[in-house]
Amino acid sequence: MAFNIQTFKNNMTHDGARPNLFKVMLTGEDNAWSQAVEKDSLTIRASSLPGSTLGTVVVPYFGREVKFAGNRTFADWTVTVINDEHFSLRGRLEDWMHNINRHTANVRGKAKYAVDATVLQLSKQGGSVNPLRTYTFKNMFPIDLSEITLDWGDNDSIEEFTCTFAYDYWIADSSGSPATPAAKTIN
């Protein structure tokens, strides 16, 4: 096959997906979160689309290794947050974790603590109206809230922190994508 730049460009639908066009929707562990979801999505400045790994079962057979597909696992998911002066998202994440396991009593505050969350890969043409792909994390909860470094010499910057979440699995959906009208949901 000969090199042809125009063929490459013609196959790159809408100039390719961009890593800076995304939106994260953290639903939180109760109704109090629903009022702040839109604001929170503006302060989450970095994230990732989820991955997954299929394990391998190796069975020795007459001196050879035969490989079979094993179980799927999902790595933890991390977001980077810009902190505001009200500690809006930081405070709610701290409260959420406190309700999962108290600081001093080592007990759970609320029965339900896992929720669903969504990350949308946005289109340059449709924005959040027609996301290219949507990932929904099922039964998610925070497991690690990073420190915020304080430093008298750190001028002209805004505090940031990360939060890592565990979840059971994710579901991908590209049905809203203008580029893939016949796309299916992966369950």
Image: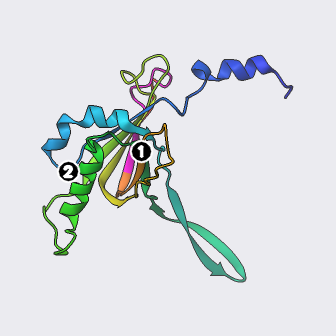
Circle 1: element type: loop
Image position, residue 24 (x, y; %):
37, 38
- Residue 65 visible: yes
Q: Nearer the viewer, residue 84 or 2?
A: 84
Q: Residues within 10 Å of mark 2 (few under 14, many from 20)?
A: many
Circle 2: element type: loop
Q: Which SS type dominates the magenta stretch? A: loop
Mark number, residue 159? 1
For discs 1 and 2, the disc positioned in front in the rendered view: 1
Disc 2 residue type? Glu
Q: Is residue 139 above or below residue 19?
A: below
Disc 1 residue type? Glu
Extreme residue in the right direction: 2
Mark number, residue 29? 2
Extreme residue in the front direction: 152
- Residue 187 visible: no
Q: Nearer the viewer, residue 6 or 48?
A: 48
Q: Nearer the viewer, residue 142 or 147?
A: 147
Residue found 67% across the figure and 75% down from its top = 65
Comes first in the chain, label 1 or label 2: 2
Q: Is residue 147 above or below residue 159?
A: below
Image position, residue 59 (x, y; %):
60, 77
Q: Residues within 10 Å of mark 1 (few under 14, many from 20)?
A: few
- Residue 71 within the magenta-colored segment of the rendering: no
- The chosen color scheme is rainbow
Classify residue 62 as left or right of residue 96.
right
Magenta span: 170-180
Residue found 49% across the figure and 25% down from its top = 180
Image position, residue 51 (x, y; %):
50, 51
Q: Are marks 1 and 2 in contact (CB under 8 Å)?
A: no
Residue found 31% across the figure and 51% down from its top = 138
